[in-house]
């Protein structure tokens, strides 16, 4: 099996190794080496990236059959010896995030006696799952403070395989069931945990730890956070955003929330005023349309087609028109999403649903339906002339 050199040294970036086996992994070329500093995907942490003899390593995995580490390559490599190089920015980011997870898990254990039952190191953020029904804001703040105090303390971090006697004396957060020796990561006297991942040498290298979000899960709560370079980048983005908002509102950064609240209140007032104005316009439009309606027996038929109009407006118009007795409203709108509304007054004995179905059949792909009093639909692209033809057809059906 491959000797896992990263277990005792997470900082080496270049190394030499012998090729034990050229192979494939998931139909891609791969190599098994006698030793490696490449970390394989496992324990919630993604694998390293880098290169072997200059060829990109696109995945590193543990082979199920014999637990050897396979280095998946972008293209085949024929060699008996290789020079490996780790993608250091990616490796160090994972070291920061994973060590930060240990620190934050211990912080939640101290702040709320919450045990970490899940961990995932993602591309943008990191999550831990805690065995609690909920987390309050004060507890979240306390855990974050404990975690960052541990960073500032700059505790030394040690990763090793203790003897059975030594292992029995350690206060591990959790002791997993594994075959073979158990690797322990100790963060000073702050935290002891079994782990096979890569970590920094001192907590100060983790950088700031920032909790972003806490959400309920089926089993416990999920805490989303970032550390180090990710936290600094996140702060930079948010600082730029707040600065731009402050400049836009011509206020200080501390006053941005108040400025946004005022803007929301103004927008809500304007929205209400606009809605009231639209309602008044619909009232006025209904009166005008009704005045120019065609008489069909004992009924008045109002027919109207527009190049573009929302379904809600058409329905509101039809409802207003048919509030008067003896009225049939046939209205429609063209556009990317056509809309048709057929409606009648309660005293008119005509089935709008049947009439609508016969008219909508003229427009391929259009759908809809309703009741004997009001039917609506459309939803597909239509030209104004097509809408007008359907309305004319419907009126012709009424004449029959």
Image: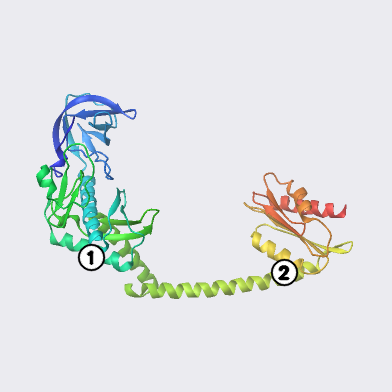
Is 7 rendered above or below residue 240? above
The kind of secondary structure element at disc 1 is helix
Q: In which quarter of the image is the N terminus?
A: top left
Is 384 rendered above or below residue 293? above
Categorize mark 1 by other alpha carbons within 10 Å: few (<14), some (14-19), many (20+).
some
Label 1 close to label 2 by CB (< 8 Å): no
- Give the residue number, with chain letter if any, for mark 1: 145
Q: Position of residue 363 (x, y in %)?
A: 71, 46
Is 303 rendered above or below residue 5? below
- Residue 319 appears in the figure: yes
The kind of secondary structure element at disc 2 is helix
Front residue of this view, candidates 335 and 265: 265
Residue depicted at 17% across the width and 59% down the height: 151
Front residue of this view, candidates 306 and 320: 320
Disc 1 and disc 2: Cα gap in Å? Answer: 63 Å
Q: Left or right of 44: which side holds 337?
A: right
Categorize mark 2 by other alpha carbons within 10 Å: few (<14), some (14-19), many (20+).
some
Residue 285 marker: 2
């Amino acid at each position: 099996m491959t000797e896992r050199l990263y277990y005792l040294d997470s900082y080496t970036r270049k190394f030499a190794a012998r090729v034990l086996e050229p192979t494939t992994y998931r139909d891609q070329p791969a190599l098994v080496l006698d030793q490696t500093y490449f970390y394989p995907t496992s324990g919630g942490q993604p694998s390293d990236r880098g290169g072997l003899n200059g060829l990109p390593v696109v995945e590193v995995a543990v082979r199920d059959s014999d637990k050897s580490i396979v280095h998946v390559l972008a293209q085949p490599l024929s060699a008996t010896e290789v020079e490996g190089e780790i993608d250091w920015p990616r490796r160090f980011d994972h070291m920061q995030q994973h060590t930060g997870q240990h620190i934050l898990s211990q912080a939640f254990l101290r702040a709320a006696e919450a045990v970490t039952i899940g961990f995932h190191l993602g591309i943008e953020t990191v999550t831990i799952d805690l065995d609690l029904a909920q987390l309050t804001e004060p507890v979240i703040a306390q855990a974050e403070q404990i975690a960052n105090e541990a960073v500032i303390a700059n505790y030394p971090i040690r990763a090793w395989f203790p003897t059975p006697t030594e292992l029995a004396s350690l206060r591990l957060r959790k002791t997993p069931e594994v075959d073979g020796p158990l690797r322990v990561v100790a963060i000073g006297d702050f935290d002891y945990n079994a782990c096979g991942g890569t970590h920094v040498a001192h907590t100060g290298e983790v950088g700031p730890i920032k909790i972003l979000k806490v959400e309920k899960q089926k089993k416990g709560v999920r805490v989303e956070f970032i550390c180090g370079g990710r936290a600094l980048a996140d702060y930079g983005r948010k600082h730029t955003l707040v600065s731009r908002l402050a400049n836009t509102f011509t206020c200080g950064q501390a006053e941005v929330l108040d400025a946004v609240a005022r803007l929301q209140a103004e927008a809500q007032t304007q929205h209400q005023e606009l809605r009231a104005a639209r309602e008044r316009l619909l009232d006025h439009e209904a009166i005008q349309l009704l005045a120019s309606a065609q008489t069909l027996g004992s009924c008045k038929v109002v027919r109207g087609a527009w190049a573009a109009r929302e379904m809600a407006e058409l329905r509101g118009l039809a409802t207003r028109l048919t509030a008067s007795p003896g009225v049939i409203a046939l209205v429609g709108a063209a556009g990317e999403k056509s809309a048709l509304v057929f409606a009648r007054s309660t005293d008119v004995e005509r089935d709008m649903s049947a009439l609508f179905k016969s008219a909508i059949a003229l427009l391929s792909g259009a759908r809809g339906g309703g009741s004997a009093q009001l039917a609506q639909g459309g939803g597909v692209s239509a030209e104004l002339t097509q809408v007008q033809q359907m309305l004319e057809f419907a009126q012709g059906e009424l004449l029959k």
